[in-house]
Image (cartoon, helix red, strand yellow):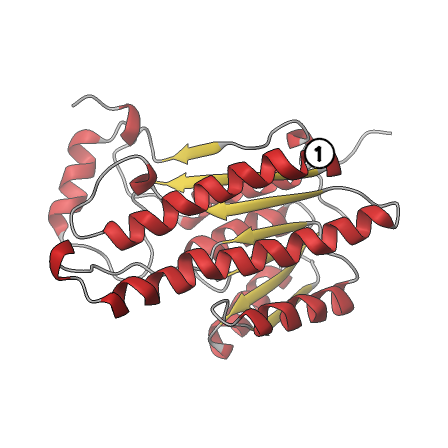
Amino acid sequence: MVSRHLFDLSGRVALVTGGNSGLGLGFAEGIARCGGDVVIWGRKTDANVRAAEHLASFGRRVHHQLVDVVDEDAVHAGFAEAVRVMGRIDCVVANAGVLSKGGAYHEMPARVWHELLAVNLHGAHYTLQAAIRHMLDRKAAGDPGGSLLACGSLTTRYGVAQSEHYAASKAALASVVRCIAAEYGRDGIRANIVLPGFFQSGSMPPDRFTKMLEERCPIPRWGKPADLSGIAAYLMSDAASYHTGDLITIDGGWSSSVL
């Protein structure tokens, strides 16, 4: 039999943290467009409802939950609810994160450092752990396989002043993902991380950043959340069954530019 298309996700369920807006919604939309059902985690009810209504317009089942990934107990309870409602989870996108300038590194308060890592690193850790436990349970029941995707950053590869805490969280997350890929590949669990470039999300930076992109970036524009839709669908699909442990850069060619 021939599937509808290469990235057919019919009958599969993805959970996307921070999936009610921005990059997270971009990931979720790609999955829904290819036939996958979606669970949205977010910290704002109104944003969750709007995102769920949008994703449901593609004819998919959508479940939304108020979950703060900083709270390990909330993550475990939320995951259990998601499985109970949807029946299974085949893919988890650990996208929830915050971005904040920490000021000069030598003056950065410990509070700023720890608050950011609590979301970007520890929250992703709780989420990925819960996902792996569920996927191992499914394997024991004769239903192996699963795809894990984390949202990283170009700061994994490049230095950005006054962003040491953010870069630390994303670089650590990339290492966690690669270790997961090495440890659980034989269980049918794949793990990858996407490193987005300059994307429109939330408030826009000063115009000088737009000018910088137009002058240097081979694709001279800001990235849009929809530009991440394809990679999410691909990595969740059988087409990516041999793809794991990778750091995938989606930055319009920024990293390859020598200008």
* 180 horizontally vs 213: left or right: right
* 163 horizontally vs 170: left or right: left
Q: Residue 67, how many percent across, how many down?
A: 54, 72
Question: Which residue is rendered at x = 74% and y = 64% of the image?
Answer: 83
Q: Is residue 113 visible?
A: yes
* 8 horizontally vs 226: left or right: right
Q: Residue 51, how many percent across, how many down?
A: 53, 66
Question: Which residue is rendered at x = 52% and y = 44% of the image?
Answer: 229
Residue type (three-letter) at the residue carrying disc 1: Asp
Image height check: is 23 above or below 249?
below
Question: Which residue is rendered at x = 67% and y = 51% of the image?
Answer: 132
Image height check: is 13 above or below 81?
above
Question: Which residue is rendered at x = 81% and y = 51% of the image?
Answer: 138
Quickly name the residue at label 1.
Answer: 238
* Placement of the N terminus among the 4 image quadrants: top right
**Res. 62 image quadrant:** bottom right
Compare residues 198 and 118 and report the one nearer the observer. 118
